[in-house]
Image: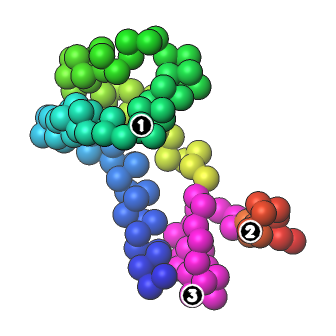
Amino acid sequence: TDKTKESVSEIAKEFQGVTGQQPVTDKELAKAQKDETLTLAGAWESSGQVAHSIAEIIRFGLPENYFETFPDKVLALKLDDVNKAARRVVQPKNLIWVIVGDRSKIEPGLRELGFGDIQLIDTNGRVIK
Protein backbone atom coordinates (compact mmCIF):
# COMPACT_ATOMS: atom_id res chain seq x y z
CA THR A 1 0.00 0.00 0.00
CA ASP A 2 2.73 2.47 0.88
CA LYS A 3 4.54 1.92 -2.45
CA THR A 4 1.60 1.45 -4.84
CA LYS A 5 2.21 4.67 -6.74
CA GLU A 6 5.92 3.95 -7.09
CA SER A 7 5.31 0.35 -8.15
CA VAL A 8 2.76 1.28 -10.80
CA SER A 9 5.02 4.06 -12.05
CA GLU A 10 7.97 1.67 -12.37
CA ILE A 11 5.92 -0.96 -14.22
CA ALA A 12 4.63 1.73 -16.59
CA LYS A 13 8.23 2.85 -17.25
CA GLU A 14 9.24 -0.74 -18.06
CA PHE A 15 6.39 -1.10 -20.56
CA GLN A 16 7.29 2.24 -22.16
CA GLY A 17 10.96 1.30 -22.25
CA VAL A 18 10.56 -2.12 -23.82
CA THR A 19 8.63 -0.55 -26.69
CA GLY A 20 10.94 2.42 -27.04
CA GLN A 21 14.31 3.46 -25.72
CA GLN A 22 15.05 0.39 -23.58
CA PRO A 23 14.34 -2.71 -25.68
CA VAL A 24 15.10 -6.22 -24.47
CA THR A 25 18.84 -6.87 -24.24
CA ASP A 26 20.83 -9.96 -25.24
CA LYS A 27 21.37 -10.73 -21.58
CA GLU A 28 17.64 -10.50 -20.79
CA LEU A 29 16.74 -12.70 -23.74
CA ALA A 30 19.32 -15.31 -22.77
CA LYS A 31 18.02 -15.38 -19.19
CA ALA A 32 14.41 -15.72 -20.36
CA GLN A 33 15.36 -18.52 -22.76
CA LYS A 34 17.19 -20.33 -19.99
CA ASP A 35 14.33 -19.86 -17.52
CA GLU A 36 11.70 -21.04 -20.02
CA THR A 37 13.58 -24.14 -21.14
CA LEU A 38 15.49 -25.44 -18.13
CA THR A 39 12.42 -25.46 -15.89
CA LEU A 40 10.33 -27.62 -18.21
CA ALA A 41 11.36 -30.97 -16.74
CA GLY A 42 10.17 -29.91 -13.30
CA ALA A 43 6.85 -28.76 -14.74
CA TRP A 44 5.54 -32.34 -14.88
CA GLU A 45 6.46 -33.73 -11.47
CA SER A 46 2.87 -34.47 -10.46
CA SER A 47 -0.15 -35.85 -12.24
CA GLY A 48 -1.87 -32.50 -11.66
CA GLN A 49 0.90 -30.68 -13.50
CA VAL A 50 0.70 -33.14 -16.39
CA ALA A 51 -3.08 -32.68 -16.52
CA HIS A 52 -2.60 -28.91 -16.57
CA SER A 53 -0.24 -29.16 -19.55
CA ILE A 54 -2.69 -31.39 -21.41
CA ALA A 55 -5.46 -28.90 -20.64
CA GLU A 56 -3.32 -26.08 -22.09
CA ILE A 57 -2.82 -28.06 -25.30
CA ILE A 58 -6.56 -28.60 -25.61
CA ARG A 59 -7.60 -25.10 -24.52
CA PHE A 60 -5.29 -23.29 -26.92
CA GLY A 61 -5.52 -25.80 -29.77
CA LEU A 62 -1.80 -26.55 -29.64
CA PRO A 63 -0.23 -29.49 -31.47
CA GLU A 64 0.22 -32.66 -29.40
CA ASN A 65 4.01 -32.29 -29.57
CA TYR A 66 3.92 -28.66 -28.42
CA PHE A 67 6.04 -29.20 -25.32
CA GLU A 68 8.53 -31.33 -27.27
CA THR A 69 9.17 -28.54 -29.76
CA PHE A 70 8.85 -25.63 -27.33
CA PRO A 71 12.49 -25.51 -26.13
CA ASP A 72 13.92 -25.40 -29.66
CA LYS A 73 11.50 -22.65 -30.63
CA VAL A 74 12.35 -20.58 -27.56
CA LEU A 75 16.08 -21.03 -28.06
CA ALA A 76 15.73 -20.06 -31.75
CA LEU A 77 14.28 -16.64 -30.87
CA LYS A 78 16.45 -13.74 -31.98
CA LEU A 79 16.69 -10.43 -30.19
CA ASP A 80 15.29 -8.51 -33.15
CA ASP A 81 12.24 -10.82 -33.27
CA VAL A 82 11.55 -10.35 -29.58
CA ASN A 83 11.81 -6.58 -29.79
CA LYS A 84 9.59 -6.41 -32.87
CA ALA A 85 7.01 -8.54 -31.06
CA ALA A 86 7.23 -6.31 -27.97
CA ARG A 87 6.56 -3.20 -30.04
CA ARG A 88 3.59 -4.90 -31.71
CA VAL A 89 2.05 -6.55 -28.64
CA VAL A 90 2.86 -4.27 -25.69
CA GLN A 91 0.65 -1.20 -25.89
CA PRO A 92 1.35 0.90 -22.76
CA LYS A 93 -1.33 3.49 -23.53
CA ASN A 94 -4.00 0.77 -23.78
CA LEU A 95 -3.37 -0.90 -20.43
CA ILE A 96 -6.12 -1.44 -17.94
CA TRP A 97 -4.68 -1.44 -14.46
CA VAL A 98 -6.39 -3.51 -11.79
CA ILE A 99 -5.19 -2.34 -8.41
CA VAL A 100 -6.45 -3.62 -5.10
CA GLY A 101 -5.85 -1.86 -1.84
CA ASP A 102 -6.95 0.64 0.73
CA ARG A 103 -8.52 3.30 -1.45
CA SER A 104 -7.92 6.12 1.01
CA LYS A 105 -4.19 5.37 0.99
CA ILE A 106 -3.52 4.58 -2.67
CA GLU A 107 -5.98 6.62 -4.73
CA PRO A 108 -4.30 10.04 -4.30
CA GLY A 109 -0.96 8.71 -5.53
CA LEU A 110 -2.55 6.90 -8.44
CA ARG A 111 -4.35 10.07 -9.49
CA GLU A 112 -1.00 11.89 -9.50
CA LEU A 113 0.25 9.47 -12.16
CA GLY A 114 -2.36 10.79 -14.59
CA PHE A 115 -3.44 7.55 -16.20
CA GLY A 116 -6.99 8.81 -16.62
CA ASP A 117 -10.23 7.91 -14.91
CA ILE A 118 -10.22 5.59 -11.95
CA GLN A 119 -13.13 3.23 -11.98
CA LEU A 120 -14.10 1.48 -8.78
CA ILE A 121 -15.52 -2.02 -8.84
CA ASP A 122 -16.86 -4.24 -6.10
CA THR A 123 -15.68 -7.78 -5.30
CA ASN A 124 -18.05 -9.13 -7.97
CA GLY A 125 -16.61 -6.89 -10.68
CA ARG A 126 -19.54 -4.50 -10.79
CA VAL A 127 -18.87 -0.80 -11.25
CA ILE A 128 -19.44 1.27 -8.13
CA LYS A 129 -21.12 4.57 -9.02
Residue 33 image offset from top left, x and y in percent: 21, 32
Residue 56 image offset from top left, x and y in percent: 51, 28
The outermost residue toward the front is 47
What residue is shown at x 57% (from left), y 49% (from top)?
Answer: 95
Mark toward the viewer: 2 or 3: 2
Q: Give the vertical position of 92 relative to 29 (above or below).
A: below
**Nearest to the observer: residue 67 or residue 3:** 67
* Disc assigned to residue 105: 3
Residue 113 image offset from top left, x and y in percent: 52, 69
Q: Kindly indicate whether the residue at mark 2 contacts the one at mark 1 (C-beta within 8 angstroms).
A: no
* Disc assigned to residue 123: 2
**Nearest to the observer: residue 116 or residue 129:** 129
Q: Amino acid at mark 2?
A: Thr
Q: Tell me the magenta residue range.
A: 97-118
State which quadrant residue 115 falls in: bottom right
The residue that mark 1 highlights is 47
Q: Kindly indicate whether the residue at mark 3 contacts the one at mark 2 (C-beta within 8 angstroms).
A: no
Label 1 or label 2, whichever comes before in sequence order = 1
Local secondary structure at mark 1: helix
